[in-house]
Image (spheres, rainbow, N blue to C red):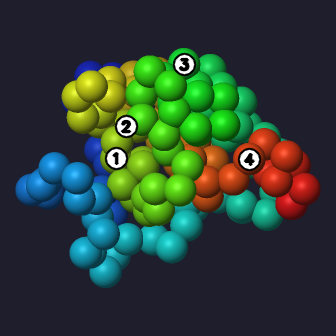
Amino acid sequence: MHASGSWRPPPCCSPAPRRRGRPPCSARRSTPDKPPLDLDDPAIVKQGEELYGQTCRYCHGKEGQGGRGPALRGRGFDYCYVFDRITNGDPPVPAFNRLYTPEQVWKIAFVQSVNITRTEVRSF
């Protein structure tokens, strides 16, 4: 957890004017290609999947297929957009910056942004 006001987003996700429906970092050259984690590590993938299952699945479905909230699969979100949306929220999505550390959010962003099923994740 972070003390109130002490957390700052990574440079790729610095506050910037947003337009509805457009990822805030998509036009920025500093957006990283991937989260600062070893995505070849099956343990990292599993942790992201577990974190997603703790909060995100209730609205977005077990496999990101949608439910009470919109489907996440097949949407083509970039990592930075997903990181920003999970961390800072954007109604009706709540902010999770007090629940998850930035490293945990990156893990969730990876699972959501690759848009693959649980079986495919395990086959890496």
Identify the secondary structure beneath mark 1.
helix
Quick one: label 3 or label 2, which is nearer the N terminus?
3
Q: Are marks 1 and 3 in contact (CB under 8 Å)?
A: no
The crowding category of the residue bearing disc 3, from other C-alpha atoms within 10 Å (few below 14, some 14 to 19, many at least 20), is: some
Quick one: label 1 or label 3, which is nearer the N terminus?
3
- Of circles 1 and 3, the one toward us is 3
The crowding category of the residue bearing disc 1, from other C-alpha atoms within 10 Å (few below 14, some 14 to 19, many at least 20), is: many
The extreme right residue here reads 123
Give the distance between the C-alpha atoms of the residues marked 1 and 2, in whole angstroms.
5 Å
The crowding category of the residue bearing disc 4, from other C-alpha atoms within 10 Å (few below 14, some 14 to 19, many at least 20), is: some
- Of circles 4 and 2, the one toward us is 4
Give the distance between the C-alpha atoms of the residues marked 3 and 4, in whole angstroms.
16 Å
- In the rendered structure, find residue 84 and report the number of the disc placed on it: 1
Q: Residue at x 23, y 53 (%)?
A: 21
Quick one: label 4 or label 2, which is nearer the N terminus?
2
- The residue that mark 2 highlights is 87
| Amino acid type of the residue tagged 2 in the rendering | Thr
Quick one: label 1 or label 4, which is nearer the N terminus?
1
Identify the secondary structure beneath mark 2.
helix
| Amino acid type of the residue tagged 4 in the rendering | Thr
Whole-percent x, y for residue 9 in the image: 32, 48
Seen from the viewer's position, the closer of residues 63 and 16 is 63
Q: Are marks 1 and 2 in contact (CB under 8 Å)?
A: yes
- The residue that mark 4 highlights is 117
Does the image show residue 89?
yes
